[in-house]
Amino acid sequence: MPARTLLAAVAIFAAPVFASSSTAARANDLTIVTREEAMQSAIQSAYVQPFTAVTGLAVQQQLWEGGIDTLRVRPKTTDDPWDLVLTDPDELTIGCNEGLFEKLDWTAIGGKDHYMPQAVSDCGLGAVVAATILAWDKDKLPVAPTWQDFWDVAKYPGKRGLRKGVRGNLEFALMADGVALADVYKTLATPDGVDRAFRKLDQLKPYIEWWSTEAEAAHILASGDVLMTSAPSGQIATLAGQEHKNFGLQFASSLYEIESWSIVKGSANLRAAQQFLYFTGMPAVEMRLLRQSGDAGLAKGLNEGLPPELAAESPGSTANLAAGLKVDAGFWHDNLPRLRQRFDTWQGH
């Protein structure tokens, strides 16, 4: 399908939307739910404001911390319904299997061929590629480090930042211990592999500054509290641009996963949700999000003709995807409770 444009969107939406504007005004506003305040702010500017300008439809935004239990319970306990939710791969799979989400009508949201293959599923439209990378201060360390360098505090003295949680840290520990990307989850699937990852974390433990939110990850680097840190790529790229920081983003051996839009089952604003997905899936609109937040969408054509500096920081570029490792959602679905308990015990001592 040819790349869609904003003018095409106006032509498509104008007749059906404005002809029924009185009905839309009486209905509940479209409510979309995302994670992290930074993402919410970027979506408001890049997506919500232009969408409302084109369609006349009001949109409300809310935040959530994630978790399938919230999706199971919330529709039964509140009169403030959600319509579109940004889900991680595990939430998407479970929610779709349990009937918590609508099956997507792809003809109403642009067609499957409009998106990269990994963006397409029965109940989810890939919204962003979320990458956790190695970030560092280039003024202090001009050469791009690896995870082996991240662990080498003798050669590169200084504190290191890691997210306070098991997911991701075991993978990075094995990469630092020489495990090839293709073998990381094979190794973690064995008791010896898990022990190996924790032994590697033992080596770094005295030098770790823990972060819990995306904003904290960027803050500890900007403040100079750490020389390097794992961090969401978008948060680091955005802060570097806003505050003119000389940060580096290492996508080699990064971890990435796709967060998807899912329509809550029984949404009273199904048509408006479909319109929102159609509109925000245009490369020209996804480009707005990439420039403002550093987060990349999955519409075909988004990465064509990107300026080199923007392509280098885009987690959805072909080169950066190829250099990283996709998070194995199935592994973490099966093992997270057990490994989280072990990590929390380890981290607390």
Image: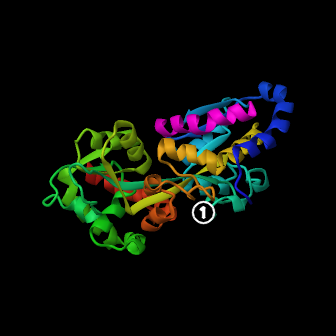
Q: The N terminus lies in which quarter of the figure?
A: bottom right
* Percent coordinates x, y for residue 334 in the rendering: 48, 62
Q: Nearer the viewer, residue 179 or 289?
A: 289
Report the residue that reaches farthest toward the left.
154
Task: Look at the picture and state if 186 lies above or below 292.
Answer: below
Q: Is residue 13 visible?
A: yes
Range drawn in magenta: 36-56
Q: Callout 1, which amino acid? A: Gln
How many numbered marks have been drawn onto this rendered protein structure? 1
* Main secondary structure of the magenta stretch: helix
Residue labelled with disc 1: 118
Magenta includes 50? yes
The answer to whether 332 appears left or right of 33 in the picture is: left
Q: Is 47 located above or below residue 248 in the figure?
A: above
Left or right side of 192 for 255: right
Which residue corresponds to the image point at 38% horizontal and 40% vertical from the top-left?
A: 239
Q: Is residue 157 magenta?
A: no
